[in-house]
Image (cartoon, grey):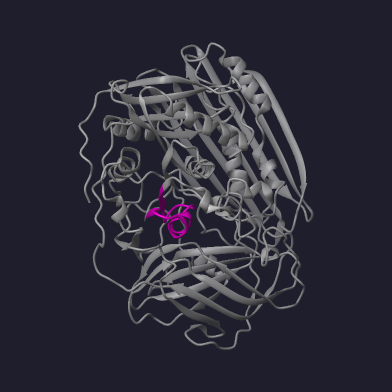
Amino acid sequence: MPTTPNALRTLTEDPDFAITLSDGCRLSARVWMPEDAGDDPVPVILEYLPYRKRDGTCARDALTHPWFAERGYACVRVDMRGNGDSHGVMEDEYAPQEQADAVEVINFLAAQPWCNGRVGMMGISWGGFNGLQVAALAPEPLKAVITLCSTVDRFADDIHYKGGCLLNENLGWGATMWSYSSKAPDPALRPDWREMWLERLKAEPFLPETWLRHQRRDAYWRHGSVIEDYSAIKAKVLAVGGWGDAYKNAVPQLVEALPDAKGIVGPWVHKYPHFAVPEPRIGFLQEALRWWDRWLKDADTGVENDPDYRAYLMDGVRPARWYAERPGRWIAEANGATAHLDTQALHLTDTGLSPTAGPLTQTVTSPAHCGAESGEYCAIWLGPETPGDQRGDDALSTTFDSAPLEQDMDIVGAPQITLTLASDQPQAQIAVRLNHIHPDGAATRITYGVLNLSHRTSAADPTPMPRGTAQNITFKLDHIAYRVPKGHRLRVSISDAYWPLLWPSPTPTKLSLSAGRIDIPQRPTFGGDEHIFEPPTAAEPWQVDTLRPDAHVRRQETDTVTGTVSLIIEDDFGEVRDSEHGLVSGAIAREHWSIHPDDPLSAKGTCHWTDTLTRDDIALRTEARCEMTSDATRFHLTARIEAFENDTLIYSRDVAKSIARDHL
């Protein structure tokens, strides 16, 4: 695969490039570009985020944007409205205002004398989402998108609801944004920083409340879900994901749906692939450069001839809460992703998983704390976040084991579960895990899926389960590429609770199974790599002085007096001083999730973020707290934001909301 030769160009950098929108709101951008771009215009690569370019994304920005800029691009990292060093206030994630601003930004940048009129958007997570969303608006200069760790369906495959079940990440990530968006601009860049900060604090929404008011797939979620109309996307899309990340399904979905789209999925968690973990990393910057050079410079880089789908087939390994490396191999599908692969049906029977159907008379009734080894919904902070040994959860679930495999099995795609079941309660949920069982009994989670049974026929128009009446349900587990070795077993594990990943149903339930089948997509087994990537490279890392190192804790506790089970998370992200401009920034996040095994209404989640900024003799701090509980009919949310200047409280606000449960 050729990499376009580019003579390295000398760079200039602007840390606070102004983009003034039509309503007068000034956005702040950090721009890297060749210093001769005025004489030899270049395309723009735009990354458009709320995560603070001055301190929040500096580490990854330093590794990435200058590398492209040296090779003939203007890399523009914009703080969106109401965040970082930009003016205004942010209403919500992926709001129409955010997208309209992005279109203005693209048209503004394309018209600059140093731009050749072509723009690409690149981003991970939020930036991956809005790259697709803006592409669906089809601004004329936007010719290409690289979307990483994103989704095509905001309801079905984001941090709010999965299979119609309420993810606890709805509160967890809402707490993160409650914290991030409450931070002040850098006083060195804005003489009106204090006024901006107070405006932001007063207007900032508590987003978990907003999201919890939409418990079904309504117009709120359809907005920004590009699955609604793939044909609206005209830009060329390269989609990238990781098997250790929450957002992996969009890559094969985009490859199957969009002409000329290409997809890459590695073993990684929620990070860019040139510095992601677990290993192996790839030369992502080189791959991206080939994409940009083809669609923004008309260079013949051969990207059209790349396989449509390149995925890392992970060897089945023992369960661990963290992996430094995943052994395996790269596989390649020339046309399409996985839809064309054959599937093998295994039936759930009273004697286990079987190639042939048989009697099934099992019940599922799990204690409320089942799911302790689920890991984080979105592994991102580099602590012990991945799923652990599933044996503990399997003991609280109904399980079905296969015979030892007669040969290696390469599972590539999204397994599908089909069940006939009856519920003794109108509101129930189900979690299905496909596990790899090692000869000594250790259980590695291969993939999983969940379903709110009220959403069994429609996520937009849910209906209660009829008590005691068998219903047919079908849903897909997450995409995966995983090799189960010969002689090992498969296990399907089914529970009606999955805490702390999912908020529980309001009452204990009993599900009666009378038929079941799992269809497992399989790919013929081959030996070595079918695709070779260049090794990773990057620009020089962010230069900082570390004042406090980072540290990460995940601790499970059982109160032997009350029986309450808790997960305690403490992520200290440390504190650093930017070696160039001197801003000191730090953060600590804390989460506590507790439940009693016999009482789903005992569920409780609390989050507390501390963020600090220090500039010369100005010390700024925000404390962002929130909590969620529920009863049988309502969710209860409380939150408080506090802002301190030199340890003096200058602003505080409390939120208390009670929201009706809607088939949850």
* Residue 35, quarter of the rendered image: top left
Front residue (pair 119, 650): 119
Q: Tell me where residue 386 appears, x and y as whole percent.
A: 45, 54
Residue 177 image-quadrant placement? top right
Residue 170 position, x and y percent, is 61, 47
Residue 545 at least partly seen:
no
Residue 257 is inside the magenta segment: yes
Residue plotted at (56% across, 88% down): 358
Q: Which quadrant holds residue 397?
A: bottom right
Residue 491 is situated, as x and y percent measured from the top left of the image, at 48, 74
Q: Which residues are magenta?
A: 237-264
Q: Is residue 619 visible?
A: yes
Give the x, y percent position of residue 654.
72, 31
Q: Is residue 556 left or right of residue 290?
A: right
Q: Is residue 353 left or right of residue 322?
A: right
The residue nearer to you, when weighing 62 against 180, is: 62
Give above or below for 264 relative to 483.
Answer: above
Please report the residue visible at 31 percent of the width from the left and 23 percent of the height from the top. 37
Number of callouts in the render?
Answer: 0
Residue 574 versus residue 152 in the image, above or below: above
Nearest to the observer: residue 529 or residue 374: 529
Image quadrant where one finds the C terminus: bottom right
Q: Residue at x 47, y 14 (%)?
A: 188
Front in this rendered view, residue 555 or 345: 345
Q: Would you say residue 449 sits in the magenta stretch?
A: no
Q: Residue at x 35, y 19 (%)?
A: 580
